[in-house]
Image (cartoon, helix red, strand yellow):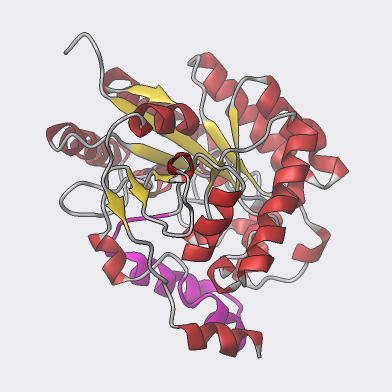
């Protein structure tokens, strides 16, 4: 093992119960049911035991509700980075106008900063929603990095599974048409890069993109929700799968940026309403046991940082630049608005 380990980053998308219900088309989401008072302390204890700091991408609507303030404030108090995960957590953010995106990001930003005392400098789109207009807004607002790209060929399969279990009208399905991306997203780069944006003149505003890492070469998902789903069948196979993914990252010199979700810390006994999610048949104890082994495996091989520190490190290098492209045809946004 070399004296200096390669870098990696770790983040958690703090999607709440209501946001999953909303995207799934379930009734009752409007009252914003929350599991943050259970999930956040459990996650903070998990990371505290390992003296590990990560990035929590927070939904602005949750920060705006008094019942969630204590849980969200505790994230910043524990020394973790906070990121912006939009205000309304709508996976059709890419269909918003630029002005609507500005309002969405600014509103989330203000509530997150009010509760945590920390101003987000990183963003991840809900459901990996992405558009050039989002990047423009982030650059104008002084964000350091985006983390919304998900380079995998399996987006259409994930979307098909989601539609098969969801309670959605045809119009609602149309809005979610780009959820998890398309097959062509598998051709996106795995390693960090900067966005080439002609209308942002200052070099300092060239956003760093840190993709959610998928398995090098094969581009299949390796973040922890997938590992835990495999553990339903065999924890040993799940951990072997993750070990192979880390080996390929090292062989290809890919600095993994891996993703957690709240349901990685919650079992069937915690949120019966979300039993339709893959892996929710497991108890929280079983999940935490497998998750702990996977995280420890990651830490043995990589220096794990919050995403902001990772972005600083890679941003100092001469990164390649890519032109942002729309994920949808312009007429689709017109249909959605009609």
Viewer-closest of 314 and 37:
314
Viewer-closest of 197 and 326:
197
Q: In this view, does 306 lie above or below 150?
A: above
Looking at the rendered image, the quarter that the C terminus falls into is bottom right
Residue at x 74%, y 71% (from the top left corner): 27
Give the residue furthest to the left: 251
State the image coordinates of residue 6 (x, y, percent, origin top left).
Answer: 26, 23
Question: Is 186 one of the magenta-colored residues?
Answer: no
Looking at the rendered image, the quarter that the N terminus falls into is top left
State the image coordinates of residue 12 (x, y, percent, origin top left).
Answer: 53, 39
Residue at x 51%, y 42% (from the top left corner): 264
Q: In this view, does 317 lie above or below 194?
A: above
Q: In this view, does 93 lie to the left or right of 317?
A: right
Q: Is residue 125 above or below residue 266?
A: below
Q: Can residue 333 be seen in this view?
A: yes
Give the residue furthest to the right: 66
Q: Is residue 118 left or right of residue 184?
A: right
Q: What stretch is highlighted in magenta?
A: 149-178
State the image coordinates of residue 241 (x, y, percent, origin top left).
Answer: 23, 41
């Amino acid at each position: 093992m070399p004296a200096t380990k390669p870098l990696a980053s770790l983040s958690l998308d703090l999607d709440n119960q209501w946001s999953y219900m909303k995207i799934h088309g379930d009734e009752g989401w409007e009252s914003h049911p929350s599991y943050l008072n259970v999930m956040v302390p459990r996650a903070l204890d998990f990371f505290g035991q390992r003296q590990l700091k990560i990035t929590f991408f927070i939904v602005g609507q949750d920060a705006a509700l008094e019942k969630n303030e204590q849980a969200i404030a505790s994230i910043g108090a524990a020394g973790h980075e906070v990121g912006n995960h939009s205000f309304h957590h709508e996976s059709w953010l890419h269909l918003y106008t630029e002005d609507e995106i500005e309002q969405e990001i600014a509103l989330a930003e203000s509530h997150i900063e009010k509760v945590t005392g920390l101003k987000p400098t990183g963003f991840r789109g809900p459901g990996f929603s992405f558009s050039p207009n989002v990047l423009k807004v982030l650059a104008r607002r002084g964000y350091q990095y985006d983390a919304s790209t998900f380079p995998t060929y399996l987006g259409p399969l994930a979307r098909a599974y989601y539609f098969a279990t969801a309670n959605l009208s045809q119009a609602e399905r149309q809005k979610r048409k780009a959820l998890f991306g398309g097959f062509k997203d598998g051709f996106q780069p795995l390693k960090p890069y900067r966005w080439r944006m002609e209308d942002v003149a200052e070099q300092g505003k060239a956003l760093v993109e840190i993709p959610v890492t998928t398995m090098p070469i094969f581009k299949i998902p390796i973040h922890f929700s997938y590992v835990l789903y495999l553990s339903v069948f065999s924890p040993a196979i799940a951990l072997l799968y993750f070990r192979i993914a880390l080996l390929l990252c090292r062989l290809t010199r890919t600095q993994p940026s891996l993703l957690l979700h709240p349901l990685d810390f919650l079992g069937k006994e915690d949120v019966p309403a979300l039993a339709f999610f893959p892996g929710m048949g497991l108890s929280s104890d079983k999940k935490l046991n497998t998750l702990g082994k996977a995280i420890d495996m990651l830490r043995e091989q990589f220096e794990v940082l919050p995403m902001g520190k990772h972005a600083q490190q890679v941003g100092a290098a001469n990164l390649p630049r890519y032109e942002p492209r729309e994920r949808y045809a312009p007429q689709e946004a017109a249909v959605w608005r009609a």
